[in-house]
Amino acid sequence: MSYPEIEYRTIPIEDLNKKQKNRPTLWTIIKHTTLFVLTFLCVTFVGIIWVGHSAHAESYWEMWPQGALFAVLLLAFLATHEFGHYFAAVYHNVKVTLPYFIPVPIGIGTLGAVIKIEERIRDTKKLFDIGISGPIAGFIVSLGILIYGFATLPGPEFIENFGGHEAIISHIQETGTFPEAPPAADPNGATIILGQTLLYSFLAGFFNNVPPMYEMYHYPFLFAGWLGLFFTALNLTPVGQLDGGHILYSLIGYEKHKQVARVVFGGITTLGGIEAIPFLYMNISEWFPGFGFTAILLWAVLLLFFMKKGFYNDIRWIFPLWVLSLGASVLYLIITSGFEQAGSLIWVFWSFFLVYFVRIEHPPVVFEQTLSPARQRLGWISMAVFILCISPTPIYFLT
């Protein structure tokens, strides 16, 4: 009796690890799915406040379809961005978690989503691919949402769906257009104005009935698209271990990136000063009349702490950038008479976040490689996207 020959193959341990490394367990899938559902519910809830047709609704339940639409659009961007990172990491056999969506029932309903890289990325090729995959994927989705929103814009009378807009509705009924400037704010509140970006302004020029930035957030496609592009720009900030930091580090190397990142951080703190000084000025003037300009001194001290921490007490960088950042903020406010213009403090928070969580400098990788020409072109395009989608004044208030 003869037996068939049996072929024995040895499976390399690397291949076995590759198959097991990023295989999530059932509990992991349930945990991440639960976070996503909670985030969807939170974004839907706050979306009702932003885009719900309150003028014709007797309860919040009647506005949930508008809130759910906003949630679908915003989470489509967030999910695409994070899964772009995730699948790039899986492709390069880098251990990574599924996206963690962060629900919060205020603001826009979420603090975003994150993945966690659970091992060191050892070469610039993998670093670049994983870093750029999220922003590029999210940018494409957000751009599509925004263009669709522009292409399907209703007429100005759409604003009649929202309560508390009597002055604007009256102007539209008389002229057929939105007022060029927002009407006087409610004495008990403030008018929210979203900041223009180069890309948004460019696209808006091709369409009719584009709402002003003080009403744009009532339009779910425009608002979700604007948020997606702005969050993409924040992630592309070429500092530390943000996506933009990974990309620029891979393009120009450790030493050059350190210099560029410090200069960029100086620019961000300049924007932070433009927000913080008026905020401090108005509050100090209210509490201690005549002492409002001590706001400059308070911001100067806080700025010094930021730079000492961010630049590791390197006085060669701290002093010149501290002077330039503070001086540029004050000069801008003097020229624009902006000491009483309330900002959102987004750039103050971002400065704090960069210094204490992200860090300014990118840690070195083990193997620095020269990227292929295609990767280099894509990397510089992403830096252009950062410039096109960032807003110096993303949110401010007319009081």
Image (cartoon, grey):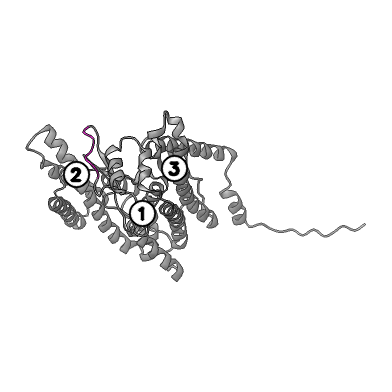
**Nearest the eye: 201 or 343:** 201
Q: Is residue 236 above or below residue 396?
A: below
Q: Quadrant of the N terminus?
A: bottom right
**Kind of element beneath mark 3:** helix
Quarter where residue 240 is shown = bottom left
Answer few, some or many: residues within 10 Å of disc 2's Cα (few below 14, many 20 plus, some between 14 and 19). Answer: some
Point out which mark residue 70 bears. 3
Instruction: Farthest residue to the left: give it.
Output: 290
Camera-near label (1 vs 3) is 3
Tell me if residue 117 can be seen.
no
Q: Position of residue 66 (x, y in %)?
A: 45, 39
Q: Report the residue marked by disc 2.
A: 341
> Residue 233, labelled with which disc?
1
Quick check: is 103 in the magenta stretch? Answer: no
Query: Can residue 196 be seen at all in this image of the molecule?
Result: yes
Q: Quarter holding the C terminus?
A: top left
Amino acid type at mark 3 = Phe
Q: Which residue, as the protein is rendered here, is positioned at the far front?
A: 174
Estimate the spatial distance between the alpha carbons at disc 2 and disc 1, rounded to whole Å: 24 Å
Which range of residues does the magenta coloring cover?
Answer: 182-187
The mark nearer the N terminus, 2 or 1, is: 1
